Amino acid sequence: MPVDRKTRKEWDVKKTTIFKKHNSRARVSCILDVHSKHIITAKIASKRIKETALAIEHLNNLNRRFDIRKLITIYDRGYTSKELMVTTACMDSKFLIRLKKNTFKNKIKRMDCDNGMKK
């Protein structure tokens, strides 16, 4: 993004910054329909807004436009959020979140292959 007065104002770049040149940064978030390959909701926001907050905003947008109970939302690793999971579940929708391989490391160590958990 160009660094001009309008951009600095829109993205809240302080005039008192110690840098002579401050690059404005933005977060781009969207939900894509994997079948049609169309973006069905998108937003450009400040980097200060969390990705999960934008994801919830997208869910609310989708819920107003579609029967979200018939949708499965797929998220990447950065979206492991209890708030996002609860929000989606409260909408009676389904979701899949890719986790880091060590997310349930301790629980997996305690598992017994016959009945699930060791005593």
Image (cartoon, grey):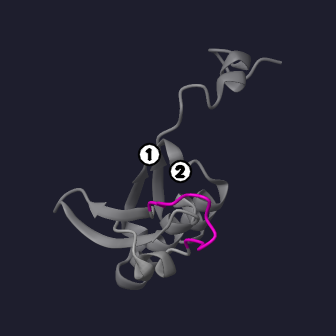
**Magenta segment includes 14:** yes
Residue 92 x %, y %: 52, 68
* Residue sitting at x 35%, y 83%: 65
- Residue bounds of the magenta highlight: 13-23
Reading the image, the residue beneath label 1 is: 76
Residue farthest to the right, as pictured: 119
Given residues 75 and 63, the one toward you in this image is 75
* Residue sitting at x 35%, y 79%: 66
Residue 41 x %, y %: 34, 73
Reading the image, the residue beneath label 2 is: 79
In this rendering, would 91 be left or right of 108? Answer: left
Image quadrant assignment for residue 38: bottom left
Q: Amino acid at mark 1?
A: Asp
**Res. 112 in view:** yes
Image position of 9 with respect to 13: above or below: below
**Res. 116 in view:** no
Image quadrant assignment for residue 16: bottom right
